[in-house]
Image (tube, rainbow, N blue to C red):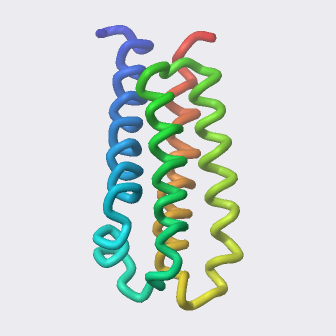
Amino acid sequence: MNSPDGRRRVLTRLLAALGLAWGAALLARPQRVVDAVDPVFPRARLWVARLLGARLVAEHAALLIAPEPPVVRLASAVELVHAASMVPVLLLPRYRRAAWLSGGIAAACAGVLPALRAGIRD
């Protein structure tokens, strides 16, 4: 684990574990999470939080199991698409805070994942 590849795999798995926990929280307790981060988010739209949670669980479980370059690239691309999809939502005051948070986290992951992948051999 002292090799750069080993450290990067550990960091990738740590990031994946955090993403998995965040997704599981959104999936299992969307109202509690939404109340904590965006109290004005409409209750009728909690299905969106659950859907995001399911996507995060699937993506980060795959990363946790196989922190290999193809999986990391795919996860990074998915995060980038999600971040981009939040940009127009920023125009809607009712959803702005949730969009900032969700899109910001996705953008950060999209940037960090390739940096971690850079040292892992294909």
Residue 76 position within the rendered picture, expressed as x and y whole percent measured from the top left: 61, 40
Nearer to me, 119 or 52 = 52
- From this view, report whether residue 92 is shown above or below residue 49: below
Residue 107 position within the rendered picture, expressed as x and y whole percent measured from the top left: 56, 54
Nearer to me, 61 or 10 = 61
Residue 77 position within the rendered picture, expressed as x and y whole percent measured from the top left: 67, 41
Residue shown at 53%/36% (left/top)? Answer: 113
- From this view, report whether residue 69 is shown above or below residue 77: above
Residue shown at 33%/55% (left/top)? Answer: 25
**Quarter location, residue 106:** bottom right
**Quarter location, residue 9:** top left
Residue 42 position within the rendered picture, expressed as x and y whole percent measured from the top left: 47, 85
Quadrant in which the C terminus appears: top right
Residue shown at 30%/9% (left/top)? Answer: 1
Residue shown at 41%/27% (left/top)? Answer: 64
Nearer to me, 3 or 48 = 48
- From this view, report whether residue 25 is shown above or below residue 48: above
**Number of callouts:** 0
**Quarter location, residue 35:** bottom left
